[in-house]
Amino acid sequence: MQTSAGRRRFLAALAATGAAGLMGPTNSRAQGERLETTSVRLAKITGTCIAPQYLAEELLRLEGFTDVRYILFEAGLGQSKAIARGDVDFSLNFAAPLVIPIDAGEPISIIGGVHTGCFELFGREGIRSIADLKGKTVGVQGLGASPHVFLAAMAAHVGLDPLKDINWITSPKIAPKELFAEGRIDAFLGFPPEPQELRARKIGRVIVNSAIDRPWSQYYCCMLAGNREFVRRNPVATKAVLRAILKATDLCASEPDRVAKRMVDGGFTQRYDYALQALKEIPYTKWRDYDPEDTIRFYSLRLGEVGMVKSSPQKIIAQGTDWRFWRELKKELKT
């Protein structure tokens, strides 16, 4: 994380561009409302798409949080488990890996949608669609990891059986991206900055870009989820966290160059050029355009088709979501 001096420089830079108007501290809270807690823990993972979570540190302090901590966890189901156990209070995570533990009864509350598509499916020559993955090798970090869950849902959507029709390849030593680059697998689903790197290296071809290709572009990719007990006991603090994340999302759209530099300086990513490209490509401006409940319903149905969840979408929505804060802030943060 940045030093206090680094945070001050970053806020000063934002103020100089006029972006600090997005960051008004506590004046958006009702008169007399106080945070029930001034401590909040967020997950830290590799990846560019959840930039709002990292940028939010300064915004959370302006909201009144004095103890803001980032705790390292594995992306995907690892984040979800950390939220459920109470090891972290909140994290941005991909929608599908949140649905699975909620179906299993884990105490997770999804409280808002943050941005739409950021993943891209790469294939070797001759693979032009998801349906062409039948009988092919696809690399994932592990079964149950976010790329596996997403791609299984995508395969089911076009009529494939991901258990029988796809040969999933995992390696404890070599990342799927490198297996793909070396020609040892046929396809790979990547999250920023991986797609930016592969395109720069001119490796493979993009089969699906979830930022522009339907139906994936019509649903949230990353959503903010919290520990259910934290959300229940701390509604003012919960709304403040979501407010900070959504303001940070707007800053990712309006100030991508400064946000990319912040991420590199803070140790959240290594390459400024890849981070900047990803921030410009991810549709951060669209968080107001979609209904987060539609996203949970969509992925609940897709994951149900492949047997990854058993509950109905209605049950998952009822026991694992709380949209009141998101709906209030959508009105409050109108542009």
Image (spheres, rainbow, N blue to C red):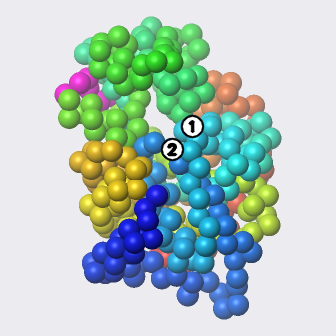
- Residue 55 visible, this orientation: yes
Residue drawn at x 35%, y 10% as measured from the top left: 184
The image shows residue 49, relative to residue 182, as above or below, that is: below
Disc sitting over residue 45 in the figure:
2
User: Taking 284 as reference, is 17 left or right?
Assistant: left
Q: Are marks 1 and 2 in contact (CB under 8 Å)?
A: yes
Tell me how far mark 1 sits from mark 2, CA to CA: 6 Å
User: Taking 276 as reference, is 42 left or right?
Assistant: right
Specify whether residue 242 is painted magenta: no
User: Taking 106 as reference, is 116 left or right?
Assistant: left
Residue drawn at x 63%, y 31% as measured from the top left: 303
What residue is shown with label 1? 74
- Name the secondary structure under disc 1: loop
Disc sitting over residue 243 in the figure:
none
Q: Which residues are magenta?
A: 202-207
The image shows residue 255, relative to residue 312, as above or below, that is: below
The image shows residue 37, relative to residue 263, as above or below, that is: below
| Residue type pointed to by label 1 | Glu
- Residue 331 visible, this orientation: no
Q: Nearer the viewer, residue 25 or 212?
A: 25
Specify whether residue 205 is painted magenta: yes
Q: Position of residue 186 (x, y in %)?
A: 36, 14
